[in-house]
Image (cartoon, helix red, strand yellow):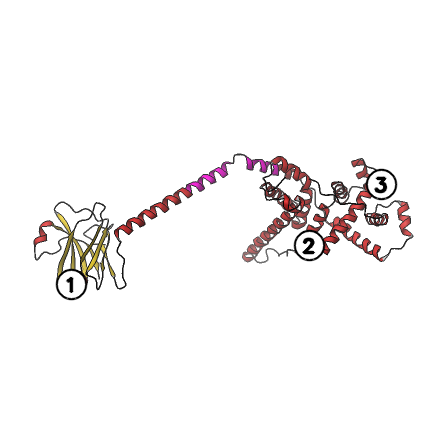
Amino acid sequence: MSSTDVVSPEQLALLYDDHAPSVYRLAFSLLSQKQEAEDLTHDVFLRLQRGGFDSNRGEIRQYLLLLTRSMGINRINKRRNRRQILERFRPGHGQQDPVDLQAIDARFRLEKALAELSAREQQILTMNYRQDISQSNIAASLQLPLGTVKTISRRALLKLRRALSSQEDY
Amino acid sequence: MSSPSQPNDDFTKRDELLAGKVLGNLSSEETELLAHESFSAEEENLLKELIAAHSRMESHTAPPLSAAVRERLLHSSRQKRTFNPQSWFIGVLLLSLAFTGGELYRSKLQIANQRGAIAPIARHPGDRAVELHATAAGNMQSVHGEVLIRPGQASNLLTLNRLPQAPEGRLYRLWAVTPEGVKGCVHFLPDQGGNVIMTIPAQPTGSATKLLISLDPISSRNEADAQPLQPVLSGAI
């Protein structure tokens, strides 16, 4: 992708495969509901297709995460507004859940830090943390020596910590 | 479209051991090695940060993403590029609205121009417009008209729109009802469009309490004591 061109369905499929897990994780951490997070993921990629991304201005993962964050906050605000209206007519209908912007930003930063890892490192961390697969099973699945999987995951954690620290310093 | 890889050869073996301790993937030899060593303050700090990153990763989980989302997205993305009757309908509707709006605007301009042609005389402060209304007998509800009384000017102004053509042998006439009696003013006929615009003498309309327009026989023009026979419009001052 070169600039703000409209993305073809074929390009979109490739981009989705590369970045959807990250977008979805952030969406889920914002909205806490699987269905809503999936809808948001869908909408983020559909927005991408319209051509808002300019590759001269940054990485696509960063762009998608920023888009997810802002569209997610919009959804939370809409949800809050609906509840406020209901509350006006039916007192005691629902409690307001405050938008925790700090928590949202912490999750956003974590996804940004993950985006700095190599594809292999992300894959191994995802299998380890998200899918709860043991390192020996990861090694078998990826046909890598167990020692290599251990080394990659240790270095990935070290990089992750470094990326998070640099964001906080920034 | 993979993310850029960072150089990873700047981590020491010791850093990697500490990461392995946090991840719980140390071998028995590595565990033994670390068990007998104390950590420096810098290492303690690194360990603390690694534990924080590790726990953030552990809590940052989500249920599996359904494959249906991908299918839905690709379906939506293809739909956007193919014929969408709803979008076309909305487009045609918007075009029609724009066209109708343009026509309305054009008509408005035409009407404004026509009005401008009919009433080109500018009003002055103190001028007073006496509106003329259809009388019950006249059956001329569609007629709009007024006499502009212009104090200090040599003439007043009569304007009428949509006035029906006078029947054969008849004329329209303006009358002024004054304290001294009903006095006949000008005779007139409308143009083909039913419009009348004419200056009239300042008197007797200037001192009238009421104005009348009647449809009278042509022969009444020469009668000194003529009276309005069939008033069709009137206006009180």
How far apart are the two marked residues, 2 and 1, measured between alpha carbons?
Answer: 88 Å
Q: Is residue A8 left or right of residue A109?
A: left
Left or right: A39 in relation to B106: right
Question: What is the chain identity of the residue bearing mark 3?
Answer: A
Q: CA distance from mark 1 to mark 3?
A: 119 Å
Considering the whole magenta stretch, tell me its main secondary structure.
helix
- Describe the element under mark 3 as helix, strand or loop: helix
Q: Which residue is mark 1?
A: B178
Q: Residue at x 61, y 44 (%)?
A: A54
Query: What amino acid is labelled 3 in the image?
Result: Gly
Marked residue chain, label 2: A
Q: Which residue is mark 2?
A: A103
**Label whose residue precedes the other's in the sequence (2 or 3):** 2
Q: How many marks?
A: 3
Given the image, on which type of amino acid does mark 2 rest?
Ala
Which chain letter goes with mark 1? Answer: B
Give the answer, above or below, for where A128 lies relative to B119.
Answer: above
Q: Would you say residue B175 is visible in this rendering?
A: yes
Circles 2 and 3, Cβ within 8 Å, touching? The answer is no
- Quarter the N terminus of chain A occupies: top right
Residue B113 place in picture, x, y as percent: 30, 49
